[in-house]
Image (cartoon, rainbow, N blue to C red):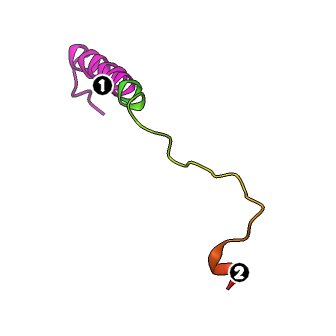
């Protein structure tokens, strides 16, 4: 089995992969601060809901 990739190409692929991962993490951290919470739960009230009371 012959090795078709040189050491320089393998190192460049590793560096680019690490750069891509770090970029995605930073992007998600910055965009996560602007978002609102996904689910906002209400407290249960003592009064029954209108459609259940009918």
User: For mark 1, what is the residue?
Assistant: 20
Quick one: 48 or 34, which is closer to the camera? 48
Of residues 50 and 26, the one nearer the viewer is 50
Against 20, residue 47 (above or below) is below
Q: What is the crowding at mark 1: few (fewer than 14 residues within 10 Å), some, or many (at least 20)?
A: few
Drawn side of residue 25 relative to residue 50, left or right: left
Q: Is residue 53 above or below residue 7?
A: below
Q: Nearer the viewer, residue 36 or 49?
A: 49
Image quadrant in which you'd find residue 47:
bottom right
Where disc 1 sits, the SS reads helix
Circle 2 packing at 10 Å, graded few (<14), some (14-19), many (20+), is: few
Q: How far apart are marks 2 and 1 (CA)?
A: 56 Å
4 is within the stretch colored magenta = yes
Which residue is at a point 70% across and 52% down the rendered structure image? 43
Q: Earlier in the sequence, mark 2 or mark 1?
A: 1
- Left or right: residue 12 versus residue 44 is left
Residue 13 at x, y percent in the picture: 26, 23
* Most frequent secondary structure within the magenta stretch: helix
Q: Nearer the viewer, residue 42 or 29?
A: 42
The part of the image, by quadrant, that contains residue 2 is top left
Total numbered badges shown on the rendered structure? 2
Give the residue pinned by disc 2. Answer: 53
Q: Residue at x 33, y 26 (%)?
A: 27
Which region shows up in magenta? 1-27
Left or right: 54, with 7 as reference point: right
* Element under disc 2: helix
Q: Tell me the residue at 67%/86% (across/down).
A: 54
């Amino acid at each position: 089995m012959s090795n078709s990739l040189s050491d320089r190409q393998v190192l460049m692929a590793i560096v680019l992969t690490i750069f891509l991962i770090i970029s995605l993490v930073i992007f998600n951290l910055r965009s996560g601060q602007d978002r609102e919470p996904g689910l906002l739960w209400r407290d249960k009230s003592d009064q029954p809901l209108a459609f259940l009371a009918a």
